[in-house]
Amino acid sequence: RVPLLQAAGKKKSLNLLPLNEAELEEQFVRGDGPGGQATNKTNNCVVLKHIPSGIVVKCHQTRSVEQNRKLARGILQEKVDLFYKGEESDVFKEKKESERKKREKKRRAKENLERKKRLKEMQELDKN
């Protein structure tokens, strides 16, 4: 189920399972990564844990604690939805659809490249 949870945090789904605030454990910790003094001195990284499923989300995308709280809840909601619904989840379906579109785009680009290559070869033969 771990690869399933990696699909979360990408899209906005409407049909997600609701989160109960009583089932959440929230911490504010110092973030990591680039940012120097602004990152090292402030506790604006949010760590959210959904107690029944054991899913933990760490969010440090902005400098604002409130924005990070909101983003963390959104990501956690998607991961909890994936955890309980599995392949029936809208998040999973969106991820599969985007992968299919990406493969299709790659296939078309490859076909176009082959077409151009053949055209160039035919032009070379016509010149000779």
Image (cartoon, rainbow, N blue to C red):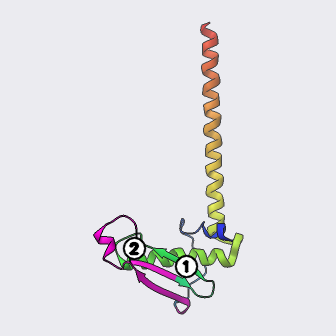
Q: Amino acid at mark 1?
A: Val
Image quarter of the C terminus: top right
Residue 2 occupies which quadrant of the picture? bottom right
Q: Is residue 118 above or below residue 1?
A: above
Picture quadrant where residue 91 is located: bottom right
Mark 1 Cα-neighbour bin, 10 Å: few <14, some 14–19, many ≥20: some
Quadrant of the rendering where the N terminus is positioned = bottom right
Residue drawn 60% across the image and 38% down it: 109
Q: Which residue is denoted by mark 1 in the rendering?
A: 56
Question: In the structure shown, which secondary structural element does the residue marked by tag 1 occupy?
Answer: strand
Instruction: Please say whether residue 25 is one of the residues in the magenta stretch.
Output: yes
Q: Is residue 37 left or right of residue 30?
A: left
Cα gap from disc 1 to disc 2, whole angstroms = 15 Å
| Residue 88 in the image, given as x and y percentages of width and height | 71, 71
- The magenta segment: 22-48
Q: Which residue is depicted at the point 61% across and 50% down?
A: 102
Residue 114 shows which numbered tag?
A: none
Q: Amino acid at mark 2?
A: Gly
Residue 31 marker:
2
Mark 1 or mark 2: whose residue is earlier in sequence: 2
Quarter of the figure with residue 117? top right
- Determine the residue positioned at 47% across, 80% down: 47
| Residue in front for this viewpoint, 43 or 81 | 43
Residue 57: x, y in percent? Answer: 52, 76
Q: Is residue 73 left or right of residue 81?
A: left
Residue 77: say if magenta: no
Q: Residue furthest bottom?
A: 22
Residue found at the very far right of the displayed protein: 87
Looking at the rendered structure, the secondary structure element under dot 2 is: loop
